[in-house]
Amino acid sequence: MNVILVPIDQVMANNYNPNNVPRNNMILLERSILDNGFCFPIVTIYDEEIDKYIIVDGFHRYTILKDWLQAKEIPIVVLKHDIKKRMAATVQFNRARGVHQVELMSDLVQTLVEQGATDEEIAQHLGMELEEVYRLKQITGIAELFKNQPYSKSWIMMDVKEEDIHDE
Amino acid sequence: MLKQIYIDRDVLTAARERISMIFDDFENIIVSISGGKDSTTLAHLALTEAHKRNRRIGIFFLDEEVVYDSTIKQIEYVMSLYPENTIPLWFQIEFHLTNATSLTEGQLICWEAGKHKIWMRPKKPFAIQHKPWSKEKETIRDKNKGFGFYDALENFQNSKHNTAFLIGLRATESPNRWRAVSKNPGHKDWYWTTKLKNGNIAAYPLYDWNFHDVWRYIYDNKLRYSKIYDYMWRKGMSFQEIRVSSLIHEKSFKALVELPEFEPKTYDRLLRRINGISIGHIYGKDNKAMRARKLPKNFKNWMEYRDFLLKTYPDETKKWIFEKRFAKQLNNNYVARQQCRQLILNDYENNLPIDNQPDPREEKIKKWRELL
């Protein structure tokens, strides 16, 4: 696999990618590129009619590099796929991903707290709202939140005659 | 007329009194549990009373097979709280469940014989694995649907006599059900009970509790509860939204979306068990695929989309049910959209009934036209 560096204007998006990254994750993606560098080249095919590289995977990283960080060049990999294979590849790249288990995500946040990270740092680097950090930090569980709640007043259903109801 | 009157007691004191009265009047007591917080609390209250009186009560769980592992752990926990006062009634029998996630398998038969290799988990040795009532006596509400969850409950209840079934229903949780059950007292003047067959009653001792009372009780008594509640809360859900439900019926898409994040192993087993699960996970929150929120762009209106969905409905044996139902309904965009939802969710049972009204939008337009 050869990674090449090309002018960023020679790379363009495809017109079929159904993946959409919400804004908070775009901010996280920028954070990730700044913290870790640009670790993965963009996957493309070469369209000789227009002399452009069309993106198969990596559209959002390309967007960050081009529009947010105003980079001039971008590392790419060029595949030799026909349109059918390209579309399939795009979906494969998007969908063959895991999800974060809530339980382990909690453990991870706990560890960061023990390492001395502040809530704000955790929120910024993991791309979370502060509220989410608070909730993941909570180890005691939901019942604990209600320990000082007084019990409600009891009520009964009573058959009352209409005329007995006075203004209370 | 019936009116709600506050009395000078807190809900905990009142519930303990109600449970004590049931113990005075009924020899046989069975608590239904689901693994949720309300029925856990109710079972603990009843078992505490049973322990005090040195009596044994039934703890009943109708196992749908396709449930969270956390639910199963919770049932095991409740049944082990006071073993000497507990008659475990853990039912693992075959019955039909609506599977809203698949168009080709509209129903899942839980604990289906011959499929034990792909069951979500093995049966429990001490569970009740065969229907303890005779085939001749068995009642079924709806022959089209087959023997379902409520049939299993009903037949179980009818197999008992002079028994009080305790249920963790709360009025604030389901006002409609509460209105329905509080109309006629089932025993003495206890309007928080309803009459069943064979001298049985259903009783709702927690009817006046709020969710924070339940959590407070769980905290005070250091009870365990299903981990799913904590997961949901950590995921940012509000207290009102947090509930532990079934995994595959029409209101549980949300549960499927979260499942891989909560219990990845359960999700993997579910994939093996049922078609359509992975679809539910991917599109459960997407408004087009499962909810009929947005009209797909290749259709002019909802009526056209409905006709297309009906024409291409994959289960020939169920198609007529929709055709017959829709024939009686108005033909407008408002109704058709709901019909689309039923078709997409495979809801031939009419669990999400259709509001058969003239299209409110058209009515508005008509009004304006008359004005202009």
Image: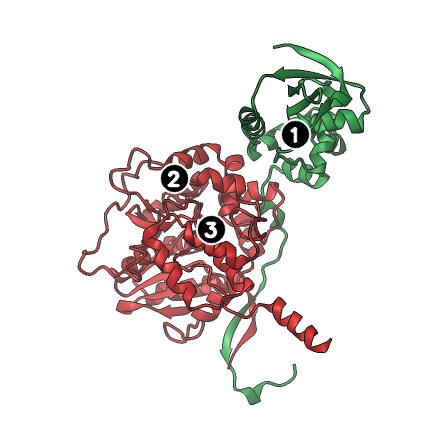
Chain colours: A green, B red
Q: Is residue B39 visible?
A: no
Q: What secondary structure is found at the residue carrying circle 3?
A: helix
Q: Nearer the viewer, mark 1 or mark 3?
A: 1
Q: Nearer the viewer, residue A102 or A139?
A: A102
Chain of the residue displaying label 1: A
In the rendered view, does B79 fall on the left or right side of B334? left
Discs 2, 3: same chain: yes
Q: Earlier in the sequence, mark 2 or mark 3?
A: 2
Q: How far is mark 2 from mark 3, CA to CA?
A: 17 Å
Q: What secondary structure is found at the residue carrying circle 2?
A: loop
Q: How far is mark 1 from mark 2, CA to CA?
A: 35 Å
Discs 1, 2: same chain: no
Please state which amino acid type lies under the numbered disc 2: Ile
Q: Nearer the viewer, residue B45 or A49?
A: A49
Q: Where is residue A84 in the image (x, y as percent from the top left)?
A: 53, 27
Chain of the residue displaying label 3: B
In the rendered view, does A22 fall on the left or right side of B90? right
Tag 2 and tag 3, C-beta contact below 8 Å: no
Q: Would you name the residue on which mark 3 appears?
A: B344
Q: Would you name the residue on which mark 2 appears?
A: B274
Q: How crowded is mark 1: few (under 14 residues within 10 Å), some or many (20 or more)?
A: some
In the rendered view, does B230 fall on the left or right side of A33? left
Mark identifier at residue A14: 1
Q: How far is mark 1 from mark 3, CA to CA?
A: 31 Å
Q: Position of residue A153 (x, y in %)?
A: 58, 65
Q: What secondary structure is found at the residue carrying circle 1?
A: loop
Q: Which residue is drawn at 37% across and 37% down?
A: B273
